[in-house]
Image (cartoon, coloured by chain):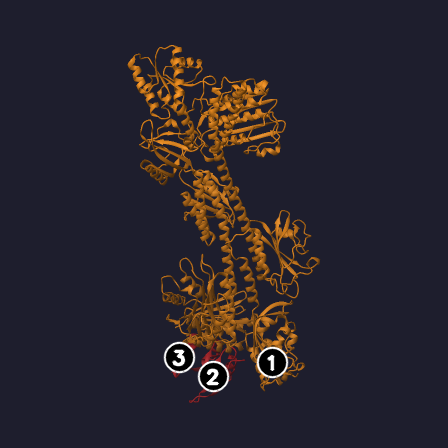
Amino acid sequence: MTTTLTLAPGRGPDGAARLAVAGEIDMSNAGRLAEALDSRPGPLVVDLTEVEYLDSAGLSVLFAHADRLELIVAPLLEPVLTVSGLAGLVPVHVSGTRIGPEG
Amino acid sequence: MSGARADVDAQVFTADPEVGGDLARVDWTATPLGPPRQWPQSLQTAVSILLSSRFPMWMAWGEELTFFCNAAYRRDTLGRKYPWALGRPASEVWAEIWGDIGPRIDAVLGTGRATWDEGLLLFLERSGYTEETYHTFSYSPLRDDAGDVVGMLCVVSEDTERVIGERRMATLRDLGSDPSVIRTEQEVLAFADRQLSRNPKDLPFTLTYLFDGGDARLVGATGVTPGTPVAPRVLPVAGDDGVWPVAALAEGETRLVPLTGAPFVGLPGGGRPEPPVEALVVPLLQQGSAPYGFLVAGLNRYRDLDERYRGFVELAAGHIASGIGSARSYEAQQRRAEELAELDRAKTTFFSNISHELRTPLTLIMGPVEELRTRLADAGEDIRTELDAIHRNGLRLGKLVNTLLDFSRIEAGRMQARYEPVELGAVTAELASVFRSAMERAGLTFEVDCPALDEPVHVDRTMWEKVILNLLSNALKFTFEGTVRVAVRRSGPHAVVTVADTGTGVPEAEMPRLFERFHRIENARSRSNEGSGIGLALVRELVGLHGGTIDAESAEGKGTAITVRVPFGTAHLPEGSVVSEPAGARASATADPYVHEALRWLPVSAAGAAADDGPEETEAAPLGSHAGDTRSARVLVADDNADMREYLTRILTAGGYEVTAVTDGVEALDAVRRRTPDLVVSDVMMPRLDGLELVTRLRGDSRTASVPVLLLSARAGQEASIEGLRAGADDYLVKPFAAAELLARVRANVELARLRGHHLRWRTALIDSLQEAFFVCDESGAVVEINTAFTDILGYGPEDLPYAPVPPWWPDPDTDPVAREQVGDAFAGLLENAQGSHTVPVTRRDGRRRWVAVTYNKAEDPDTGRQVTVGTFRDVTAEHYAVQRETALAALSTSLSRASSMPEALSGALDQLRSLWHADVVLAAVFDGDDTPALTATDPDLRWENLPDGRRERLGALRGRPPLTVVTEDSGAGVLLEHPRGPLTLWVDLGGDRPFTSEDQLLLSLLSGHLAQGLVRAHQIDQQREAAIALQRAILGPARLPDGFAVRYEPASRPLEVGGDWYDTVTLPDGRIGIVVGDCVGRGLEAASVMGQLRSACRALLLQDPSPGRTLAALDRFAAGVAGAVCTTVFCGVLDPATGELTYSSAGHPPGVLVHRDGAVRLLEEGRALPLAVRPGRTRPEATCALPARATLLLYTDGLVERRRLPLSTGIQRAGDAVQEGRDLPVEDLAGAVMARLAPAGGYDDDVALLLYRHPAPLDITFPAESSQLAPVRKALRSWLARCELPPNAVQNVLVAVGEACANAIEHGHRHAPGEGVRLRAVALVDTLRVTVADSGRWKDPHPGANAHRGRGMSLMRAMMQQVTVSPGPSGTTVDMQMRIP
């Protein structure tokens, strides 16, 4: 049994490429997230609002694409992003508030 | 079956992968049930419920009653029949018990009503042998979809351990019951047999053998008849061909003996179908010694010989051995104590009686005989001969009585000794010379080899004479030819005197008894058959008083040599009786009876006239008339002029008088008081005390008032003579005088005085022969007259009369103020009252304490008209000490019977001994095999290490002595006695210079015997207590507690007995947990047994109906039928661990305590009703409460919180505080902390059972090291964290940190040992959360780079939790994480 994870590629209201992720991300399914990111080159907004759990395996996938991502997360994930340092590399919006670096 | 269909079939069994897997593999098509996919829904549901229950169940369905069971049933009951049994007909699975259960199942199927059986005995074949098991079970009907009964479900709990444990406990309890009654060995064995025979199930037969020399003797048997091949009455220890391995058992080994072969045919089965096949033979161990014997225990073939069974047999043997030990030690000590006391009584009585009874009549015989001999001096030869015969034999009798009196005095410690320095060679040679003529007349060579020694020896002259004269007399008696030789030598620190003869010798067999009293060597050839067999015994006693030893060597027909060794110096002698100056006088009078007697042994021709001419004065006849013809009068001459003394002596001696001469009045006064002469001839002018003053003094003393005095003076003239006569002189002679005139005056005065003094002398003689001490006091209380018994008892003689108050025999006010006061009071009474009697302590001249009973009367002196007090007293020391002994024994017995443990018994006894002897300190050391002996002392600060070396050595050395034999030294005494843990040596230190008398020694010996018995009894009580605690703990544990619970049981501290407190947890079929804490009223093994029954019943009831109220109501009815169960208090609750909801009911039990996470205490006070069985039949209330997260539930028995003089609420508050204080402790540690915190200083004085639960229970999951497990684990953790009521942020942090740790564990575990499990355990303390994740792999260092996200995981863990520890180990890695709960 793998952990529940849905990946919904799409476009944002501004037309930017966007990937909506829901569920939990751990080592059992981080590969699927990696595949989804690999298949979407170029700048990408990853909407993690519906992600309830994100571990270091998931973080590693996001780190690999840090130069082109923007993240939207629920407040719940904020500590993980901050502690891991990803929030210092990638713009992160928490419940509409941006906490990551400019750009 | 196709794969697809098999899958469908298997779905029925998914509730339990393991048993379900095995069920799926059954070929169901071969059964009447057909393939599972075709099963009716009702069967599928039943199977599913069965498999998902954690409670042991089996079910049967369909026409063949096809068998199903779940994992719990497989584990507890089915054993090796799994998985064979699955799918088979139930009648085949349980063929061996079908007779028992078949009818029950039929009843369920027929009636549709459930059955209930408690503790049913079933013989199961599940462990490779037929096994005796007990089960409590219920059969309920199972219905098919149409509602018809087509099967049955059995819910079962196995009670085997409980039933068998209770049965064995009962036997052990009965074996150990009533330890206070000490019985004979026979009674002990009969009692043991009765108890053993009551448990034939565990002990189908038993044999008790005791070792007796080279044999083992059958002394007890149950189940088999003594004397049959299996139970020989006697088995030799040597040789292993007997039916039992006796030799090995004699070495203390235990053996398991297979019961095969001829002797074992026809053994009893103990109510079971088949006889036993094995017996366990265990030694009856004796502490520190070879076993007493052994116990053969036939074994229940239906039970495995596990540790518990073996322990049971060994404990039973231990009980028997301890019974035998105590019976034997009791018998031995009883015997010894009685012997000692009896011997003492018999000796004292005999010697007192014989001496007193003989002495008076003898005196009254010898006096008249003397008179007659005088009067009939001119009578015919025949009369003279017969009178002489009477006289001679009177002397012999007198000598015997005197010897016996010597014994009596020695026994009573009243021997008046006066040890003076003498030149032993000269003294001995002089004594020997007395015998020379007798020896020569007997034709013997008499060699006297007594050179002067270089150092004086201290001897009492009188005693020493008796020693030498007895030895010589014996030598002469038994020697017919050859030599008698006396020699004196120095040998090291001893003077050695040898008396050797060439006589008939002593047969070797008689040698050990040579010095025994009244022992005569039969048929020995001797010169005379006279003799009492007491001479050598007296010699030994006398030599002993000199601190010496005596030995004999003898060869029959060759001769005998007796060797006496006496130490030089005075250290070995009593201080008060040593004098530094030798007294000049020769006491040759002692020798006369010996020589006299010896001469009569010799043939008449050789002896000549000697037999009739011997001196007649003896101690036995100190009185009597000594008329001129046969005996001269005694005259005392006092003159300071040596020439005059010599002249007077010569004239008077020539005149036929016996003369003693002294140089002045003082010496004359002493001489007269010592031995009253017939006449005193005294010069008037003398230094120190002149003649006139001498007369005045003599007349002033009633004892000497009548002694006639003839004064000599150079002063002529009427006035001088008037002055002399006025002073009281009888006559007066002026120097110079003619010899004839002197003799005439002397004769006249002697004759006159004899007439006048006849009455007075008889009075004196009679008073002296009184067996009671006699005294006369004047008006001031001064003692003016005494008799010989007075001197005998007190040691003070007439020479120092009068004894003015305070006399020297009054006890010293400094060392013994109590005794002094007693005497002072009695004396005051004597002065005031006309008559009276008292028993008072006095101090003998030699310093010894005597007790005397005094009686006195006032009387008027007929001569002076003055009032005097006449009194008598007798020595009641022996009686006094006998009473004291009885009192001390009673006090010690009381103290011992109150003690409830061995240390208490010992220290109590030591206190008794200390107060009895007013001792400084009393010490007892038990040499129990440790490096340092265990010391008990009346001074609690004393430690073995701090004792002086000498004291330690002394205590150690006592071990070499025979038991109960008292050793005295310096100012104390020691004794060895048996103690259950090893030899015990005891020392009574009197301090100061008080002696430890022979009375004290006897008393200490008796008390030690009693103490030894008391210690054995106390030891048994200790063992009982330990057994009770062990049983209580065995019933309570080892508990398989559900997670989150902790329990404790603490027995009451000594001397209180163990009670019947209990706790219990029961996991119910629906996953809830039953919680019970109860407290039985009674104490000891009885209460433990009641507790065991109530606990089992409550457990079973909860399983049947998980309602606390209804359970307690049912327990009411059960308790009403169990003796001792009434008034038991119980708290019974049912807890849902998922929600924290607790339903409870209390039968009079103290309220449960709920401590919230903020420290607030809430009492569970609702749902209360009466204790058990007080009003059975009533409904019981229930209450419900919700346990909040991280609250702690505390249930207990009253011993935890009840304290004297404190309200219960205080105790409960303290318990709540203790729980709150332990907020950071896991619940297991918290239980220990609470017990320690609430324990009173001296330990709990009541039993305590304690049960703690902290909600929620820890989370404990084990999962395979696969990444797919991460999501379900996270789900479980999330739900558990919710129950802990953590804030959402904290939940997420824990999830991430734990997720990382689990991911790590999966990676490593997978890599190193694929398939191994990972264990996650999370515990919520009150405000701390602890999580551990343990795997079986090895971690690498967390370097980001090579494995970037793993390193990141580690950082995440550290960031999310407050404390992270990674502990790698050989079998895996454990991550421990903690977080303070905000």
Which residue is the site of mark 3?
A101
**Element marked by disc 1:** helix
Which of the two residues, B1135 or B378, is positioned nearer the viewer here?
A: B378
Amino acid type, mark 3: Pro
Q: Judge left or right: residue B393 versus residue B623.
A: right
Residue B921 percent location from the top left of the image: 42, 44
Query: Is residue B219 visible from the viewing direction of this image?
Result: yes
Q: Which residue is mark 1?
A: B109
| Chain name for mark 1 | B
Dot 3, how many residues are within 10 Å of its Cα: few (below 14), some (14-19), or many (20+)?
few
Q: Secondary structure at mark 3?
A: loop
Q: Nearer the viewer, residue B90 or B742?
A: B742
Chain coloured orange: B
Spatial separation of the CA atoms under disc 2 and disc 3: 24 Å
**Viewer-nearest of labels 2 and 3?**
2
Q: Mark on residue A22?
A: 2
In the rendered view, does B725 fall on the left or right side of B948? left
Determine the colour of chain A. Answer: red
Q: Position of residue B38 (x, y in %)?
A: 62, 85
Asked if labels 1 and 2 share a chain, the reply is no
**Label 3 and label 1 in one chain:** no
The answer to the question of whether label 3 and label 1 lie on touching residues, with beta carbons closer than 8 A, is no
Q: Is residue B1266 above or below residue B908?
A: below
Q: The disc numbered 2 marks a residue on which chain?
A: A
The residue type indicated by label 1 comes to Leu
B948 is higher (above) or lower (below) than B632? below
Of all residues, the one furthest to the right in this rendering is: B262
In the image, which is nearer the foreground, mark 1 or mark 2? 1
Q: Nearer the viewer, residue B445 or A91?
A: B445
- Badge 2: how crowded within 10 Å, few (<14), some, or many (20+)? some
Amino acid type of the residue tagged 2 in the rendering: Ala
Residue B493 lies, in percent from the top left, at 49, 29
